Image (spheres, rainbow, N blue to C red):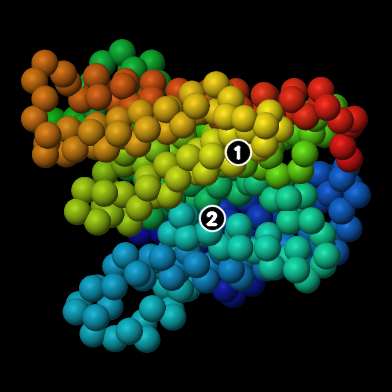
Amino acid sequence: MEASFELFGLTGYRLGLCAAVGMLALFAAMLLLAKKRNVQPVSICVLTLAGTVLGIAFARLLYCLVNLSDFTDAYENLWLTLRFFDGGLSLSGLLVGLLLAVLLTAAITGEKSAELLDILCVPMGLLLCALYLGQQDTGLGIGKIVEEGRMTEIFPWLFLCERMGVNVEYRMLVYLYQAILSCLIAVAMLLVYLAAQKKAGFRSGETGWLSLALYGAAMVVLESLRDDGHMQMIFLRIGQVVAALLPIIAILLLSSRLNRMLGKVGGRSVFGWLVILVFVAGIVVLEFALDGRLPVTGLTTGHFYLLMILICLLVAAAACMLYSSVRKQRAAVQPLQQ
């Protein structure tokens, strides 16, 4: 049950408060980046408004599509899909709505969509961090059971301790891991963006896609660790699928730009495509193995997740490599782009 509080006679919830704080932090960061890139503050206001409306709409839409049987069979009332304020939202749908808000804002204000993509996606982890932290009262973001040991003793705040008589059960607080990583990615990409936009080879939009690639690679592992049943079809998590698409799109986009500049298919582009194949095949096989649908002898759950982490680090490294290669190649053939 969500923790609630009273304010001026109104009932508020911690998740809503976290969402508001996260949105304010993202708005402040976007204004800072907009000033650096000579983007009008009114455009950031339009982007914030459009992102809020479309983000909520698509967060609700994706949730309802995945859980449509609940509204048609259990509730027998499709009109309940419109009651977004009663709960039932998807962070993956929110991400889709935010990206569509970039296109809409560019069409309304005349700003370049690539500039707006950077300004939104580079610090977006600040909002995601707040939203993940807000899940602590909803029962979402709780992970798989782990054995008591050194980690639970040294870092007890990373686990949920549940006592059932004399038995003690430890579960991973995945929402906390997601919040920490989202914040770290946002801070790191802010520093990268502020440094990159002053140097030769910079092009708007690429840092935003790199941010999405790093976020997606991290969430592929963390979404798999969750054990809350939210946004899940059979054993497949929708959040994990959407997260996996982000580094794939980023690598394809960056490799395409690198090939155009080289006038041929470069070796690094081929490497990026091979990494995508390994990434997709590896995650599919590992998820089947973790679900027990693919019997594998001699390996434990820990081994499977270690392999998954290595594969996701590989795809993140490929995105970073292509990002650096594109910038260096562009810097070699043209002056600083503003």
Q: Is residue 323 left or right of residue 78?
A: right
- The residue tagged 2 is 95
As rendered, which of 283 and 124 lies closer to the eye? Answer: 283
314 or 33, nearer to the observer: 314
Disc 1, SS: helix
Residue 297 pos. (x, y %)? 8, 20
> What residue sits right under mark 1 in the picture?
256
Quadrant position of the N terminus in the picture = bottom left
Instruction: Give the residue at the far front of this rendering.
Output: 263
Which residue is at the front of the view, 151 or 72? 72
Q: Is residue 10 above or below residue 306?
A: below
Asked whether, in this view, residue 7 is left or right of residue 204, the answer is left
Residue beneath the point at 26% across and 44% down? 227
Q: CA distance from mark 2 to mark 1?
A: 24 Å
- Disc 2 residue crowd, few under 14, some 14–19, many 20+, Cα 10 Å: many
Residue displayed at 33% across by 56% down:
231
Element carrying mark 2: helix
Residue 322 rendering spot, x and y as whole percentages: 61, 27
Residue 285 is situated, as x and y percent measured from the top left of the image, at 23, 33
